[in-house]
Amino acid sequence: MRGRKPKPPDLRALQGNVGHRPPSSAATAFVAGAPDKPEWLDADGSAEWDRLIGLLCDESGVLSPADCGILICACEHYSAFRRASRILAEKGDTYETNGEAGTMIRVRPEVRMRQDALRNYQRTLTELGCTPTQHGRVRRLPDGQTELFGIKKLLG
């Protein structure tokens, strides 16, 4: 697929209809609310879950229980980043090996693990609308409103 990825209908509606195109018929009801935190997250992942839930529920109101999977991904990537960072803080970024050519200095595998985890974490934050670029584009739901498209109002 070429070009930009399509935005979810709920995020597109919160950002406003800049192009003045008619809304997609694929728009579904969006119920705001926090998903339940998985019990198996480690300490770093659990702390990041709480931080993201506070950010996404309080400031933008764009989070729904359907977003549990991407939140878990973000928390797991953050946790992997923290684990690799702790190992590197303790052991350093390089290690020495002795071979036929003499002593060589090599980069620890945790350096790559930390880079990959940080890159994946940034990507999941982008999907959630938490990057500075995305965060400035999202508008908050009106006070007291939990449904974006107002399906209950239409159905009476």
Image (cartoon, helix red, strand yellow):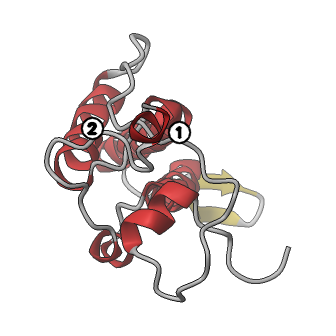
Q: Which residue is mark 1?
A: 73
Q: Position of residue 151 (x, y in %)?
A: 47, 40
* Looking at the image, residue 148 lies above or below residue 104: above
Tell me which amino acid carries mark 2: Ile
Q: Nearer the viewer, residue 83 or 8?
A: 8
Residue 59 in view here:
yes
Q: Nearer the viewer, mark 1 or mark 2?
A: 2
Q: Vertical placement of 79 versus 19: above or below?
A: above
For label 1, the SS is: helix
Where is residue 62 drawn, in percent x and y?
36, 50
Q: Quadrant of the C terminus?
A: top left
Left or right: residue 105 compared with residue 79:
right
Residue 56: image location, x then y, percent? 28, 48
Which residue extends farthest bottom?
19
Q: Is residue 111 visible?
A: no
Amino acid beneath label 1: Cys
Q: Say the numbered circle drawn on residue 53.
A: 2
